[in-house]
Amino acid sequence: QVQLVESGGGLVQTGGSLRLSCAASGRTFSSYVTGWFRQGVGKEREVVAAISRSGGSTYYADSVKGRFAISRDNAKNTVYLQMNNLKPEDTAVYYCAAGRTIALVTQQMAYDYWGQGTQVTVSS
């Protein structure tokens, strides 16, 4: 069992930055692929970024490439999402998720545990 708690969301102006954190419970965090997903109002939840168990491989949605960076610190059981040059269309609830899978995957059904989400609002 893994519990995930996100933090770091908030209100920021266009062009600003935020860093989201996801703290995980449990001693086997390094066994989980971890991803960040988001859901805007009236939209389906979508993958933003994902990172392999070791942190050696990453995936980014085209909409955030070059602006967002995912990283993890397995010693601290924490995964991060650095978000730069934020745009109004990045406004959403951001969720952290962990999946017991070997491959770096982006399908939501592959993720077993989800956090409660943190709101990110980008004003124009």
Image (cartoon, helix red, strand yellow):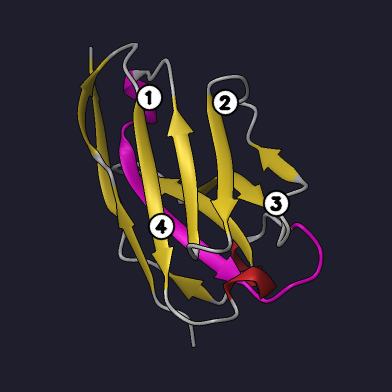
Few, some or many residues within 10 Å of mark 3 (<14, 14–19, 20+): some
Few, some or many residues within 10 Å of mark 1 (<14, 14–19, 20+): few
Relative depth, front residue between 65 and 21: 21
Residue 118 lies left or right of residue 29; in this view the side is left
Query: Sequence-wise, which precedes: disc 2 or disc 3?
Result: 3
Residue 22 tag number: 4
What residue would you read off at disc 3?
Answer: 55
Is 94 colored magenta in this rendering? yes
Marks 2, 3: nearer the viewer: 3
In x, y percent, where is residue 72?
Answer: 57, 51
Q: Secondary structure at mark 3?
A: loop
Query: Image point 49% across, 75% down: which residue?
Result: 113
In x, y percent, where is residue 7?
Answer: 28, 52
Q: Which residues are magenta?
A: 88-104
Amino acid type at circle 4 is: Cys
Amino acid type at circle 3 is: Gly
Between the residue at mark 1 and the residue at mark 4, the CA separation in whole angstroms equals: 22 Å
Which residue reaches farthest bottom? 1
In x, y percent, where is residue 53?
Answer: 71, 62
Amino acid type at circle 2 is: Ser
Asked whether disc 1 touches disc 2, contact meaning CB atoms under 8 Å apart, the reply is yes
Relative depth, front residue between 7 and 113: 7
Query: Sequence-wise, which precedes: disc 3 or disc 4?
Result: 4
Between the residue at mark 2 and the residue at mark 3, the CA separation in whole angstroms equals: 21 Å
Query: Sequence-wise, which precedes: disc 1 or disc 2?
Result: 2
- Asked if residue 61 is positioned above or below residue 17 in the image, the reply reads below
Marks 1, 4: nearer the viewer: 4
What residue would you read off at disc 2?
Answer: 63
